Image: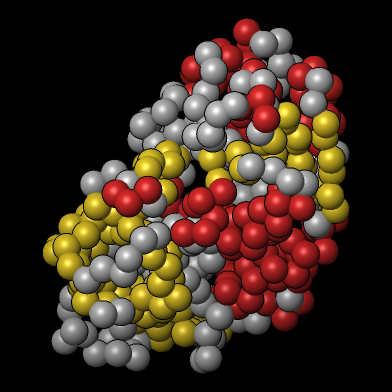
Amino acid sequence: MIADFQLPEPIKARRIVVAMSGGVDSSVVAALAARTGAETIGITLQLYDHGEATGRTGSCCAGQDIRDARAVADKLGIAHYVFDHESRFRDSVVENFADEYMAGRTPIPCIQCNMGVKFTDLLTMARDLGADCLATGHYVRRVMGEGGKAELHRALDPARDQSYFLFATTDEQMDFLRFPLGDMPKAQVREIAKEMGLAVAFKPDSQDICFVPDGDYAKIVRKVRPDADEDGEIVHIDGRVMGRHKGLIHYTVGQRKGLDIGGQPEPLYVIRIDAETKRVIVGPKEALAIRSARITDMNWIGMAYDGPVQAKVRSLAKPVPARMEGGQLIFENAEYGVAPGQAAVLYADERVLGGGWIAETTAVQLELESV
């Protein structure tokens, strides 16, 4: 199979830079790029050492991942460069992650990483290397629309689609980026790796945020912000003090477990987090129903748009009917689990229109007395 990297002929006169993380997806992209006959160069960013923050061995784009990427590059006979971006990653992603939790918001560090360290820095490096494009292993599609404008579309395989994490991609970046895996199911990608004798063919996929390999977010935040464990009140939306919590970093909107306020007549959920007063506000599930959300830092891939859209407010959620009115995203039906700090990504069928950050929400039950 020879993938279409959407480059002008003759392809042998082109130079493709591939972002190589050491996983099977980016390794197959490198293999497909090399198979076209274009000059192919692999780049790996050394981002984060798990052991530094968690005391565990292992790494993200470091250690074994770098060795795997280098082994693939050697197998393919392509150049491979490693750039140390650990300090920039820590400053722009890890510290932001900690600050968002401390502010009572629900951060999405993978998007912050794509917005900065990965795309911005990698594109600059690729251009400095004289590349015609930068190819990545993301499961999304680049489709040429009317007027020759590159559009971002969801992956063909909905189970692998990563478009939610790429809403902040700019028009200028779309001109230079390529996503050759967007039309493939994961099984096909692994089969290509196996056929080409790549040692990473059966390497497991990453399941967690790269710098939180054990899922213990609080431990990471505590290391970066030592005052993160300050306790405070757990307060019902009707004003009753229900108990005390052990630090805001242990709670997110929609959470039910871990509140330690049993014996209630109905299940209680985290409705919101008040960072200023260090209070966790709880209530019944219906209090989580959201009618609208104010969106900030909106990025449009193409033209700005007001009107009907499909909106996705969590990476694993299905897009739901909504409409944009100015900076407000208004849901057609009540939406649950909408939290400040999350991203709202807008679609028109398969096309990604853009997205932004949820700054605040408006509950369906406006008559509920605020605390």
Residue for point 36% across, 32% down: 156
Q: Is residue 321 above or below residue 289?
A: above
Q: Report the side of 198 relative to 166 (left or right).
A: right
Viewport quadrant of the C terminus: bottom left
Residue 163: image location, x then y, percent: 43, 48
Give the image location of residue 46, x and y in percent: 81, 48
* Residue 344 vs residue 167, the one in the foreground: 167
Using the image as rendered, state which of residue 242 and residue 94 is in the foreground. Answer: 94
Q: Is residue 294 left or right of residue 308?
A: right
Seen in the image, is 152 located left or right of residue 320? right
Does 297 sit above or below residue 316?
A: below
Which picture quadrant has residue 340?
A: bottom left
Q: Is residue 246 visible?
A: no
Q: Quadrant of residue 253?
A: bottom left
Q: How many marks?
A: 0
Residue under the point 52% across and 85% down: 275
Where is residue 199 shown, x and y percent of the image? Answer: 74, 17
| 270 w.r.t. 28: above or below | below
Q: Residue at x 24, y 63 (%)?
A: 335
Residue for point 60% across, 27% down: 11
In this rendering, does residue 89 appear at all? yes
Q: Nearer the viewer, residue 220 or 184?
A: 184
In this picture the colour scheme is: secondary structure
Q: Is residue 295 above or below residue 93?
A: below
Question: Splitting the image into 4 quarters, where does residue 63 fall?
Answer: top right
